Image: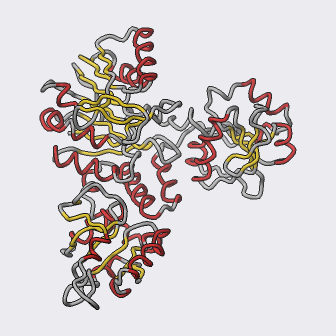
C-alpha cells in the first residue's frame, strides 16, 4: 500500500477511484477528486452502512466487490487496464487491518493507497488551503474568526492533532482581566493569554464529586494536561482509581504535589471562598491554585446563540428553541430581545428537563411561550431516546432505553412564520433541519445551529442550508476551550 503525502500524488494516480470510508475524511477526499475531474466509482466499507449511496455514488460492502470476481486470476476491482484504485480515507489506526483484508481479497498492493492527512497537512500550509477550497462553505464565511474556527476544526477532524483545535482559542477576544498575579482565571483565559503549566511540576485535580472527575479528566487529557492525582474531600471516592489516576484526600494530595499545581475540577458556583479556604488549610499553596477548568466557566465568551454582533433582534420575533433543556437559553433570548417577541416555541422531549422548564416558566412568569414535550426531527414518529442523568447529554438514538414523540417543524408551524431558530439537540440537528425545509426556504430565518455533536455536521449542515437558501451568510463561534459548543450562525 502506498502512503499518499500530497494531494498532487492523488492526481497523478489516474482515474477510477473507490474511496474506502464514508466519514469526514472520505467526504473531503471525494470533493477534492470530483473538483479535479477525477472519476469516483463509489464508496467502500466493511461496516453495516444503512445508506445505499453518498453524493449519488453507491456505498458498497467491500465483500460485495470481491464477489464480483469472474474467474481465477482476475482482480475484482480492476478494470481491463488494471486502473481502479482504492484509497483509504480513514484514521491511521485502521490501516493495517484494512490492508490485511484487501490482501485476502486479492487486491494488488499497487492499487491500494492511504491518505496520510496528518503528514501532508502538518508539513504544508498550501495543502490545507487546497483541502478547504474543496468545501463550498469557505466562501460563505464572513469574518476572520469564522475562518479560523472552520480551518482549525477541519484540520483537527482530519488529523486528530489537538494543537489544531487549540488554535480555536485564538478566536476568543483577549480578556483584559488577566493579571499575572491572579491565578484564579478560567482555563479559556489561561490558554488565550498564553498561561501554561510548568511541565516539571506535578499537577493535581480537585474534584468535589464524582461527576466532576468524569467531566474534567477526559477533557484535560485532550488538552495534553497530565494529572498526577485527583484530590477530594469525599471519603467514598478516596483510595480509588479513575482513568488510571489515584484519588486521595486533600491532605495527601498536598504532600504529594509539593509546589505543583491544583486544578479546580468544578464550575465557579462550586468553587466558593469556603472551598478555597478548605483547600489551603489542607496544605496547598494559594498561589498554586488554578481555577476553574470545567463546566461553569467555558461559556464566558459572550452569550451563546445571541452574542454575534451581526445578529440583530427583530420586532415580532418568533423564536424556536430546539433543545430547551432548563429554559436558560429562553431566558438569554428574553434578555437579548427585550420583550419585542411575538411567540416562543420551545421543544424538550426529556421529561425531567420538560418539568424543569415548566417550573422556570411559572416562576419567571414567561408569557407568549409554548412548551412542547416532543423532539424536533425530520418527521412525526416515535423514536428511541436516552435520558442522561445530567440532562444535557440526553439524545435521540436508535437503541434508546425510552421512546419519545417527534415532530417536524414544518408540520408543527403549518406554514406560519419563524424568524429565529436555535438548535442544540445532541446530533439530531441535520434531521431536524430537514424537517424545517419549507420554513427555511419560505421565511429564511436566522439560525444558530450546534455543529459539534457529529463530525460530519461541521460541513454537512452548512452545505444543506446553502441548498435551501443560497444567499445565507455564515458565521462560526466557539464557546468552550474543549471541542464542544461550536455554533454555526446563518443570516441573510
Q: Position of residue 171 (x, y in %)?
A: 45, 48
Residue depicted at x 38% and y 41%:
397
Residue depicted at x 52% and y 46%:
482
**In the depicted structure, whether residue 233 falls above or below residue 139:** above
The N terminus lies in quadrant: bottom left
Residue depicted at x 43% and y 10%:
364
Please give left or right for residue 348 compared with residue 41 in the image: right
**In the depicted structure, whether residue 93 falls above or below residue 306:** below
Please give left or right for residue 296 compared with residue 333 in the image: right
Given residues 177 and 273, the one toward you in this image is 273
Q: Position of residue 60 (x, y in %)?
A: 26, 66
Residue depicted at x 42% and y 80%:
3
Given residues 207 and 237, the one toward you in this image is 237
- Rendered image quadrant of residue 267: top right
The C terminus lies in quadrant: top left
Q: Position of residue 173 (x, y in %)?
A: 48, 42
Please give left or right for residue 304 compared with residue 264 in the image: left
- Rendered image quadrant of residue 309: top left
**In the depicted structure, whether residue 365 falls above or below residue 480:** above
Amino acid at each position: 500500500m502506498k502512503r499518499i503525502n500530497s494531494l498532487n500524488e492523488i492526481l497523478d494516480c489516474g482515474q477510477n477511484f473507490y474511496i474506502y470510508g464514508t466519514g469526514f475524511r472520505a467526504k473531503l477526499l471525494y470533493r477534492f477528486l470530483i473538483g479535479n475531474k477525477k472519476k469516483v466509482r463509489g464508496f467502500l466499507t466493511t461496516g453495516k452502512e444503512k445508506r445505499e449511496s453518498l453524493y449519488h455514488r453507491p456505498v458498497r460492502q467491500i465483500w460485495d466487490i470481491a464477489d464480483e470476481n469472474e474467474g481465477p486470476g482476475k482482480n475484482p476491482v480492476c478494470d481491463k487496464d488494471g486502473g481502479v484504485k482504492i484509497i483509504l480515507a480513514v484514521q491511521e489506526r485502521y490501516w493495517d487491518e484494512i490492508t490485511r483484508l484487501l490482501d485476502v481479497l486479492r487486491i494488488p498492493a499497487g492499487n491500494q493507497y492511504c491518505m496520510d492527512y496528518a503528514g501532508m497537512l502538518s508539513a504544508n500550509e498550501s495543502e490545507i488551503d487546497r483541502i478547504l477550497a474543496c468545501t463550498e462553505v469557505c466562501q460563505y464565511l464572513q469574518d476572520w474568526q469564522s475562518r479560523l474556527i472552520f480551518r482549525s476544526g477541519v484540520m483537527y477532524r482530519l488529523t486528530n492533532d489537538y494543537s489544531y483545535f487549540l488554535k480555536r482559542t485564538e478566536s476568543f477576544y483577549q480578556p483584559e482581566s488577566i493579571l499575572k498575579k491572579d491565578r484564579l482565571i478560567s482555563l479559556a483565559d489561561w490558554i488565550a493569554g498564553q498561561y501554561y503549566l510548568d511541565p516539571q511540576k506535578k499537577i493535581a485535580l480537585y474534584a468535589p464529586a464524582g461527576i466532576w472527575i468524569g467531566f474534567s479528566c477526559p477533557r484535560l487529557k485532550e488538552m495534553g494536561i497530565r494529572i498526577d492525582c485527583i484530590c477530594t474531600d469525599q471519603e467514598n471516592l478516596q483510595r480509588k482509581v479513575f482513568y488510571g489516576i489515584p484519588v486521595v484526600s486533600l491532605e495527601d494530595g498536598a504532600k504529594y504535589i509539593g509546589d505543583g499545581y491544583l486544578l479546580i475540577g468544578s464550575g465557579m458556583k462550586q468553587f466558593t471562598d469556603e472551598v478555597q479556604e478548605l483547600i489551603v488549610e489542607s496544605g496547598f499553596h494559594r498561589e498554586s491554585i488554578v481555577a476553574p477548568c470545567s463546566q461553569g466557566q467555558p461559556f464566558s465568551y459572550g452569550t451563546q446563540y445571541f452574542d454575534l454582533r451581526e445578529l440583530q433582534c427583530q420586532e415580532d420575533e418568533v423564536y424556536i428553541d430546539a433543545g430547551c433543556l432548563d429554559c436558560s437559553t429562553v431566558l438569554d433570548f428574553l434578555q437579548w430581545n427585550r420583550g419585542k417577541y411575538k411567540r416562543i416555541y420551545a421543544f424538550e422531549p426529556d421529561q425531567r428537563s420538560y418539568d424543569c422548564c415548566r417550573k422556570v416558566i411559572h416562576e419567571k412568569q414567561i408569557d407568549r411561550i409554548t412548551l412542547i414535550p416532543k423532539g424536533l426531527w425530520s418527521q412525526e414518529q416515535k423514536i428511541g431516546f436516552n435520558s442522561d442523568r445530567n440532562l444535557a447529554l440526553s439524545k435521540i438514538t436508535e437503541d434508546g432505553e425510552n421512546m419519545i414523540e417527534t415532530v417536524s417543524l414544518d408540520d408543527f408551524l403549518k406554514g406560519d412564520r419563524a424568524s429565529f431558530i436555535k438548535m442544540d439537540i445532541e446530533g439530531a440537528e441535520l434531521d431536524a433541519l430537514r424537517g424545517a425545509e419549507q420554513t427555511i426556504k419560505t421565511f429564511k430565518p436566522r439560525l444558530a445551529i450546534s455543529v459539534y455533536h457529529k463530525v460530519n455536521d461541521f460541513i454537512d449542515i452548512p452545505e444543506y442550508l446553502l441548498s435551501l437558501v443560497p444567499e445565507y451568510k455564515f458565521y462560526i463561534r466557539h464557546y468552550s476551550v474543549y471541542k464542544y459548543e461550536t455554533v454555526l450562525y446563518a443570516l441573510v
